[in-house]
Amino acid sequence: MTARRLRVKQTRSLEERMAENAARLRERADQLPAGTEREALLKRARLAETGAKLSDWLITRTTAP
């Protein structure tokens, strides 16, 4: 018996999902006091924002004439 792969049709772009995730992480970080957990959340938010920007940049570079 082979395992079936769950397929999901995405309704929003990767960039939108990453930006939303970054905003959610920043909101969580704002509720925490200064410390390592807050810094880790802010770092993840920055990485998500950077990933969204890079993905958007790559799309515009590959579709430009």
Image: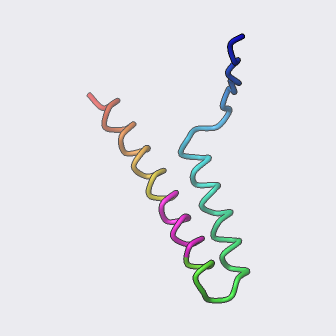
Q: Quadrant of residue 10?
A: top right
**Residue at 53 percent of width and 45 percent of height:** 15
**Residue at 43 percent of width and 44 percent of height:** 56
- Residue farthest top in this picture: 1
Prevalent SS, magenta region: helix
Q: Quadrant of residue 65?
A: top left
* Residue 45, image x, y percentages: 55, 65
Q: How is the image coloured?
A: rainbow
Q: Residue 24 or 43: which is nearer the viewer?
A: 43
- Residue farthest bottom in this picture: 34
* Residue 50, image x, y percentages: 44, 58
Q: Residue 37 or 20: which is nearer the viewer?
A: 37
* Residue 16, image x, y percentages: 59, 46
Q: Is residue 31 above or below residue 8?
A: below
For the N terminus, give its image quadrant.
top right
**Residue at 54 percent of width and 64 percent of height:** 44
Drawn side of residue 47 relative to residue 10, left or right: left
**Residue at 45 percent of width and 52 percent of height:** 51
Q: Is residue 15 above or below residue 45?
A: above
Residue extent of the magenta highlight? 40-48
- Residue farthest left in this picture: 65
Q: Is residue 34 above or below residue 1?
A: below
